[in-house]
Image: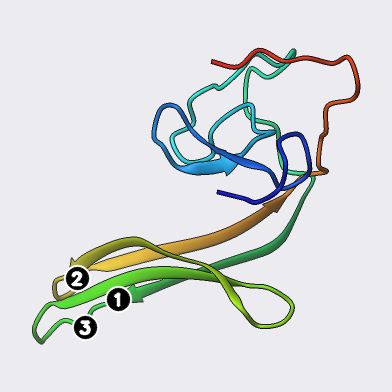
Amino acid sequence: MSSARPGTPGATRACPHCRETILESAAVCPACRHYLRYVAGADAPPAPALTPLRVEGSIRHPAEGEPWEYTVVVSIRNDRGEEIAHKLIGVGALNPNEQRSFTLTVEALPARTKGPGKGGTRH
């Protein structure tokens, strides 16, 4: 979890459904896509304000040979090059002639902070 105070940009909490660490400001969990609180007009998750990074790629096993195993790992570093997060996303295997596609997307939204007198319902 984040060391940021509740209500400040970057503050985090655990999703009550899947227990992933998510932004406190999230109305919908980006991991399990469960709704966390009511937000007017939030019938669908809002489109990100910008997508500063999107990488897509695929790997294909050749027609011959032994199966391959793969591991998908994401790490995040700060501006000093220090690793601040390292997460195993998934593992699997590829048999001959199989293919897997991967997409990494970083979504950025303006930080929303609660102003004085604006409460919220938490469950």
Q: Is residue 42 above or below residue 5?
A: above
Q: Which of marks 1 and 2 is nearer the N terminus?
A: 1
Relative side of 112 to 22, left or right: right
* Amino acid type for the residue under numbered disc 3: Pro
Q: Nearer the viewer, residue 31 or 82?
A: 82
Give the residue number, with chain letter if any, for mark 3: 62
- Where residue 83 appears, as percent x and y from the top left, is 57, 75
Which residue position holds label 1?
60
SS at mark 3?
loop
The location of residue 25, given as percent across then percent down, is: 69, 33
The residue lying furthest to the left in this view is 66
Report how far apart the C-alphas of labels 2 and 3 lie in the structure: 10 Å
Q: Distance between the residues labelled 1 and 2?
A: 8 Å
Contact? badges 1 and 2 (CB < 8 Å): yes
For label 2, the crowd category at 10 Å Cα-Cα, with few meaning under 14, some 14 to 19 and many 20 or more, is some
Question: On the image, which quarter does residue 71 sit in?
Answer: bottom left
What residue type is disc 1 on? Arg
Q: In this view, does 27 lie above or below 13?
A: above
Image location of residue 9, percent across then percent down: 78, 44
Q: Mark 2 points at which residue?
A: 94
Q: Relative to the observer, which residue lies in front, 54 or 109?
A: 109
Check the image and report above or below for 45 versus 101: above
The residue located at (83%, 43%) in the rendering is: 110
The reply to whether dot 1 and dot 3 touch (C-beta < 8 Å) is yes
Residue at left offset 22%, top offset 64%? 92
When asked about the image quadrant of residue 52, the answer is bottom right
What amino acid does circle 2 point to?
Leu
Name the residue at 8% across, 83% down. Answer: 66
Residue lying furthest right in this view? Answer: 116
Residue 31 x/y as whole percent: 47, 41
Q: Nearer the viewer, residue 72 or 66?
A: 72
